[in-house]
Each structure stands twice: as C-alpha cells, then as structure tokens.
Amino acid sequence: MTKTIVVGAGFGGIASALRMRARGDDVILIDRLANIGGRAQVFERGGFRHDAGPTVITAPFLFDELFELFGENRADHIEFRPLDPWYRFAFHDGEQFDYRATLEDTYEEIARFAPDDVKGYQKLLKVSQEIFDIGFTKLADKPFTRFGTMMAQVPALLKLRSYLTVAQLVNKYIKHPKIRQAFSIHPLLVGGNPFNTTSIYTLIHYLERKWGVFFAMGGTGALVQALRELMERHGITLMLNTDITEIMSTGSKVTGVKTAAGEVIAADRIICNGDPPTIYSQMMPQDSHRRKKALPDKLTHYSMGLYVMFFGTKTQYPDIAHHTIWMGPRFKELLHDIFDKKILADDFSLYLHRPTATDDSFAPEGCDSFYVLCPVPNLQGNVDWDVHGPALRDKIVSALEETIMPDLSSTITEDFWMTPEDFKSDYRSMHGAGFSIAPLFTQSAWFRYHNQDPHYDNLYFAAAGAHPGAGMPGVLCSAKVVEQIIETQEAKGRRSAA
C-alpha cells in the first residue's frame, strides 16, 4: 500500500488526504497545531465563539465531492445555509449597498445609485461567465506543471482581456464610484489588490451567481469537525501538535519527513499544504536553489497581511448583515499604501463578520459575536505590532461606533486580535502574508508554485501559494490537481510495466 504523508491540515491538506485515502493510500495527515483546519481554527472566549479564518462558502460542490468519495452525503453531516444579502457594503458617508442573492434584487440595489449601471452589471456578469468558463471550468483543476500548457491557453486568455486588472475590467462596465468599489473587492478575498490582480479573478462574480453564497451552520469550525470525522471514519491517521522541520530526499525522490522531536516518518509521496515559500526555505533549504522559478525571491510579491479582531457585544446589532464590508474614505490610495508602500495608514476598510445574524449559537442569548478583518501591510513593512495592535483596535472600535454600531465602546466584551506576526508564528506564513503570494498574472498558472515539484517527482503542493490560488475553492481545486497529476503518473507507470 502506498504511504502518503500530507503536511498541513488546512482545507487543501484535508481534501488531499481524503482524495488519496479514497484511492487506497495509507494516509498520515500532520499539522503543528492542536486542531485541524489550518487557518480555520475556532476561538472560544466568555461564551462567544469565533471562526478564526474563512467564513464564506462558495462552490459547495467541492465539499460535496469529498463526502461522495466515500458514498456519503455532505448534507447529512453539515448544513450549508444560503445567505441574503451576500454582502452589505457600508460606505463612510452612511450609504449602504446590498449585494443580493437574486439578480432582480441586485439590479434594484444598483439602480438606487446609478440606473445606467444595471446594464453595465449585466455586461460585466456576461464577461465574468466567459472568463469562468475558461478560468474555472477548464483550468482551475488542471495541472500547470508545463509552460506549454499555459501557452496553449494564451489566445483564449487574451480574448478575455486577462491582461487587464480586475479594477480596469469592472470600470469598463460600471461607472458609479461606489458600485465600482463593491464589484472590485473580490481579489481582496484571496489576497490581491484589485488594481493589479489579473482580471481572470472577475470569474468570482459568476461563481457566486452559479452556486450562491452560504454559511456552514455551526461555523467553519463545524465544517472542519465534519471533515475530521469523515477522515477518522475512513482510516486516515492524524498527527497533531507535530511540527515538520525537514523534508528528506534521495536522488529525485522525497523519502519522508523529520519532526521537531526528531522522529523520522517514511513516505512514498508527500503532499504539502503549507505555504510553498516556507516549505522550500525552511524545510528544504539545501534544495531551494535548484527549484525552477519564474521570478527570483526578491521579485516575488506577497499578499497583504491581516489584522483580525474578535469580540462579543452585550447587546445585539440586528441591522448588521452576516457579511458587511465597511468602506473607508479612500480605496485605491489605501490599497497602494498596504500593498506597495507597505505602511499602516491612519484610515482603513474592514470586513465585518456577524455569524449570529444566521446562527445564534455563536453568542450568549441577547448578544452578538463578531470578527473584523482589516487588510494591513505584511511583515515586509516596518510595523511594530506590539504598539500598533492595541492602537488599531481602538481606532476600529471608534470608527464602527461612529457609523454602524452605536455605543460599541460600552457594549464590547472579550475582545482580542491577531496580527501578521501571529500568521507567521502560528501558520508559518512567509512574511505573515494572509494568502501566500499575490494573485498577479505573473504569479498565476505556470508562474505560480507548481502542484508538482520540478525536481522531486513524488513531492506535491495543494496550497494557497500553488495553482490555482488562495480561497477555499482554490485550495480544494489544488487538491484535485494533485490527484490528477498522481493518476497520470500511475497510469504511465502501468503502461511502462506492461
């Protein structure tokens, strides 16, 4: 029986472990944290529960597939509840825009701001579908380990204007500045600046329209627990609180891993769900110079950092939607400060998650549970988070209190936060980046970290930094790519043996 080690128990690692187990492998899933889920940890404070990581479920079929591998039905184990609105945008001047579940409701919301933009949005959605039909349907779960694979798609990508940025493509069809902002934020959900992220990522518009936006009842932590139980039912071995310090190799093969405790675990193949820059520089430093790269390290662009603040309130805020995007006075200029200048500006924009809008189990009766995600510079910037962490907390509370959450300073309770320093220490994320390398065109497809190492033919990557990219659909598709590569390798092996 083939022995497969999966390093990292985020969603890409979980999906890889399940897919390899369904193929009959003896699978060991290893993670340095006490619980699986990667960044999808759960925090409990004073009766309030918080999902620490991803909160938005799109492309639910990718989770359904994992249960179907073993003849099970995902809905028997975890409920995905549809949301409406999908996102509420709260602008600094008090105006609000609800991005709704039906097209008719969305058209009505757009028309309140700019009636002519309704037709523009219809055109944008049509272009998004065309990009989706290539970028997601045809390419997201296909290997890009060969340059020729990407070159074969260049005519289609050029036809779809992939050389434009997300903001440029949105602005081509939408004229109102606030609606432009609302329909340009999707790259931020996967670590990209919409002003330099390839317009391929506008496919997210159609992806949401095709399958909807959902919340896993009980939270993302409940989804992780359902997946853990699925793995345990089907014989996957979990090794938690186990840090990997070295991936060992001989010739063109990796042979196993060494733990921080000095234990050596042999493997026939290794799938890495960790951040690829970290894997190469910290677990395989002797081989890092051999790896083919489209760009040298000094030219690699990383995603922004994240400041995540968790808190409860002793009262409820029923007018706050499940997902609220609080937009500050600056947009393009703020993103330039974060991504390019790497400075912590005085202003900010926020993603506010209120799970108690859908699931009251997250807080004591009569209370609400929240987390606020604030994009900030990664650790390539010079920010002293011991000083700026508490200060940013106070600024965020003040801004929310003055706008959409009156009396917040008197009702907030059990608050704490994470900074890019925590992402580096807890998740071994290079530079504390929230989403590994940024989704630029020059860091996508073949230019991104490959799903199969170019030198070790039994070392694979199913991770945010590998193709196709970050976000839950991205890493789940990354696991599918790895499975496809392995299937192709084994088929070639069988033909050679015959």
Image: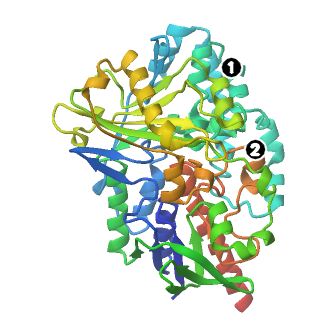
Question: Local crowd at mark 1 within 10 Å, few (<14), some, or many (≥20)?
Answer: many
Horizontal and vertical percent position of residue 141: 62, 57
Residue at coordinates 50% horizontally, 39% vertically from top-left? 387
Q: Relative to 246, is 162 on the left or the right? A: right
Residue at the left extreme of this rendering: 365
Q: In the picture shown, does residue 132 fall above or below 324? A: below
User: Percent from the top left, x then y, of residue 53?
Assistant: 44, 48
* Residue 73 in view here: no
Q: Which residue is mark 2?
A: 441
Visible residue check, residue 58: yes
Q: Secondary structure at mark 1?
A: helix
Q: Is residue 259 above or below residue 412?
A: below
Q: Nearer the viewer, mark 1 or mark 2?
A: 2
- Looking at the image, tell me whether mark 1 or mark 2 is earlier in sequence order: 1
Residue behind mark 1:
173
Left or right, 463 with respect to 280, comes to left
Q: Amino acid at mark 1?
A: Tyr
Q: Is residue 20 above or below residue 389?
A: below
Percent from the top left, x then y, of residue 7? 53, 71
Rendered residue at 55%/36% (across/down): 375
Q: Amino acid at mark 2?
A: Phe
Q: Quadrant of residue 101?
A: top left
Q: Residue farthest to the front?
A: 387
What is the secondary structure assignment of the residue under circle 2? helix
* Quadrant (top left, top right, bottom left, bottom right) of the C terminus: bottom right
Residue at image location 29% in from the left, 19% down from the top: 407
Mark 2 burial class by Cα count in 10 Å: few <14, some 14-19, many 20+: some
Q: Nearer the viewer, residue 423 or 273?
A: 423
Q: Quadrant of residue 477?
A: bottom right
